[in-house]
Image: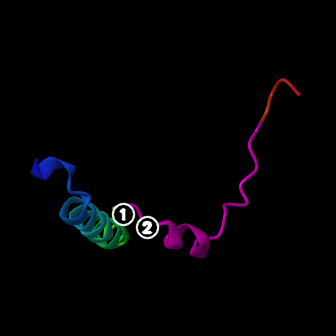
Amino acid sequence: MPQLLPTPWFTIFIYAWMVLLAVIPLKILSYVYPNHNYLRGLQKPSEHSWFWPWS
């Protein structure tokens, strides 16, 4: 019964997890976000005060 021999299946399992843990972070880190948050910090907030007639 070859299913009871854990030696090849364990190494295949370990190699599969090693590949998944090596590839998935690279794919996630290479994703380019469409919004540019770094530009938000460069813009000065407007100093226009709102007119509140009820206050």
Report the residue at 11% width, 52% height from top.
2
The amino acid sitting under disc 1 is Tyr
The residue singled out by tag 1 in the image is: 33
In what element is the residue under mark 1?
loop
Magenta segment = 35-51
Q: Is 43 one of the magenta-colored residues?
A: yes
Q: Main secondary structure of the magenta part?
A: loop
Relative height, residue 55 to residue 9 (above, below): above
Between 48 and 3, the one nearer to me in the picture: 3
Q: Residue furthest top?
A: 54
Write down the quadrant of residue 7 in the picture.
Answer: bottom left
Left or right position of 3 against 43: left
Image coords of residue 9 (percent x, y): 21, 59
| Residue depicted at 31% across the width and 63% down the height | 17
Mark 2, mark 1: which one is toward the viewer? 1
Find disc 2 in the rendering and name its residue.
36
Q: Are marks 2 and 1 in contact (CB under 8 Å)?
A: yes
Residue 23, percent across and down?
A: 27, 70
Quarter holding residue 12: bottom left
Q: Amino acid at mark 2?
A: His
